Image (cartoon, rainbow, N blue to C red):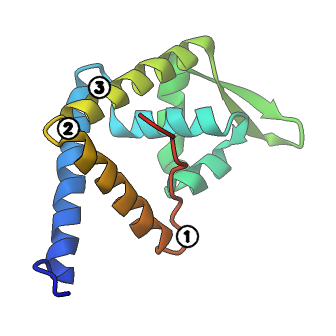
């Protein structure tokens, strides 16, 4: 069976789709005063509460210097709290405040809305097929996490 789409074109299509998704997300989150960096940091803290700034920087793939001003801003906005690390008094552990947890609820709702907007033009069967194909693709990529199956929609 031959394919009408070569590997190079497939890669270009995947990159174009990722860019379009990111652009739509940035625009919609921006309408709510949320930058991609804030969203990533808040959602990472939500999934890894009590983490140290150094560990957070590692997970985000940035330097500690890049994380510090963002954490400072989120702390100033009352979304993040720093506590001294009991194992290393020079380090801090980060947690979301109640306001930060409220921001997570807004982020989750926005992520759902943005995804629904983006994929609304695809029939349900195509959406399911795309989801299966992307999961299969990610499963072939060493070191890349594949989101868990979220079950029926």
Do we see residue 114 in this rendering?
yes
In the picture, the disc for residue 113 is 3
Cα gap from disc 1 to disc 2, whole angstroms: 27 Å
Residue on which disc 2 sits: 118
Q: Residue 46: x percent and y percent?
A: 60, 32
Cα gap from disc 1 to disc 3, whole angstroms: 29 Å
Residue on which disc 1 sits: 143
Q: Nearer the viewer, residue 73 or 142?
A: 142
Write the residue at 39% across / 57% down: 132
Q: Residue 83: x percent and y percent?
A: 75, 27
In the picture, the disc for residue 101 is none
Q: Nearer the viewer, residue 121 or 141?
A: 121
Cα gap from disc 2 to disc 3, whole angstroms: 9 Å
Does 47 sit above or below residue 72? below
Does 89 sit above or below residue 126? above
Image quarter of the C terminus:
top left
């Amino acid at each position: 069976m031959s394919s009408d789409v070569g590997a190079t074109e497939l890669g270009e299509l995947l990159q174009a789709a990722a860019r379009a998704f990111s652009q739509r997300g940035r625009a919609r989150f921006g309408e709510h005063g949320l930058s991609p960096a804030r969203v990533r940091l808040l959602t990472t803290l939500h999934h890894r509460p009590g983490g140290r700034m150094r560990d957070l920087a590692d997970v985000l793939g940035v330097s500690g210097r890049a994380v510090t001003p963002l954490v400072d801003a989120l702390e100033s906005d009352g979304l993040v709290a720093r506590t001294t690390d009991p194992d290393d008094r020079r380090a801090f552990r980060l947690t979301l405040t109640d306001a930060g947890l409220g921001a997570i609820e807004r982020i989750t709702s926005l992520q759902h809305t943005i995804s629904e907007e983006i994929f609304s033009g695809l029939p349900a069967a195509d959406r399911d097929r795309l989801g299966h194909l992307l999961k299969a693709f990610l499963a072939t990529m060493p070191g890349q996490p594949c989101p868990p199956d979220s079950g029926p929609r």
